[in-house]
Amino acid sequence: MRRGMLLALEEVNAAGGVLGKPLKIVWEETESKPAIGIYSIKKLVKVDKVPLILGGYSHGISIATGKYTNKRKIVQIAIGWASPKLRKIGPYESGSALDMGHSPPKRHQGRRNTNIGKPPPG
């Protein structure tokens, strides 16, 4: 997965980046442990001041970190297998980039993903 992210980063930056600025990836390790995941997420948010988080890979990590990032209005997109519980955390948690086995019908997927970061209706 890391190699794919680096290839995408290279392609985006070669095309001028986003809004004319190059993207940068900041890596942190979770060791598949929620406590380490929270520590890493806090560093990304408070020290590195990232605007978006891709990860963690397991839903156990993403549930713990998603609660933290959602309160701070930082979008987090899980990059691996995800629990449907992720979608219930709040508007800043996507569920999963892959959503294996939990995806809504394809006609709704784009609509759901365009709502990331928006407050729930009502």
Image: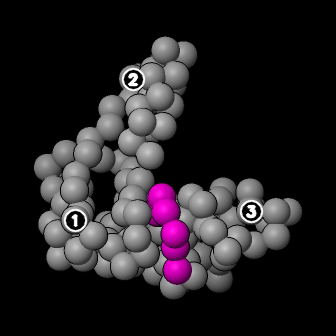
Q: Residues within 10 Å of mark 3 (few under 14, many from 20)?
A: few
| Marked residue nearer the N-terminal end (1 or 3) | 1
Confirm whether residue 21 shows in the render.
yes
Q: Judging from the image, what secondary structure is the residue with disc 2 in? A: loop
- Find residue 121 and report its image quarter: bottom right
- Residue 92 on the magenta span: no
Residue in the image at 75% along x and 72% along y: 104
* Front label number (1 vs 3): 1
- Find residue 107 and report its image quarter: bottom right
| Marked residue nearer the N-terminal end (2 or 1) | 2
Residue at mark 2: 22
Q: In the visual, does 5 lie left or right of 40?
A: right
Q: Nearer the viewer, residue 15 or 11?
A: 11
- On screen, residue 76 above or below 16: below
- On screen, residue 38 above or below 46: below
Q: Amino acid at mark 3?
A: Gln
The residues tagged by marks 3 and 2 sit, at their Cα atoms, a distance apart of: 28 Å
Dominant secondary-structure state across the stretch colored magenta: loop
The residues tagged by marks 1 and 3 sit, at their Cα atoms, a distance apart of: 30 Å
Residue 110 drawn at (x, y percent) = 74, 57
Residue at mark 1: 31
Residue 42 drawn at (x, y percent) = 18, 62
- On screen, residue 97 above or below 34: above
Instruction: Give the position of the C terminus as an image quadrant.
Output: bottom right
* Circle number at residue 117: none
Residue in the image at 63% along x and 69% along y: 100
- Find residue 109 and report its image quarter: bottom right
Q: Judging from the image, what secondary structure is the residue with disc 3 in? A: helix
Q: Residues within 10 Å of mark 1 (few under 14, many from 20)?
A: few
Q: Amino acid at mark 1?
A: Glu
- Magenta residue span: 77-83
Residue at mark 3: 109
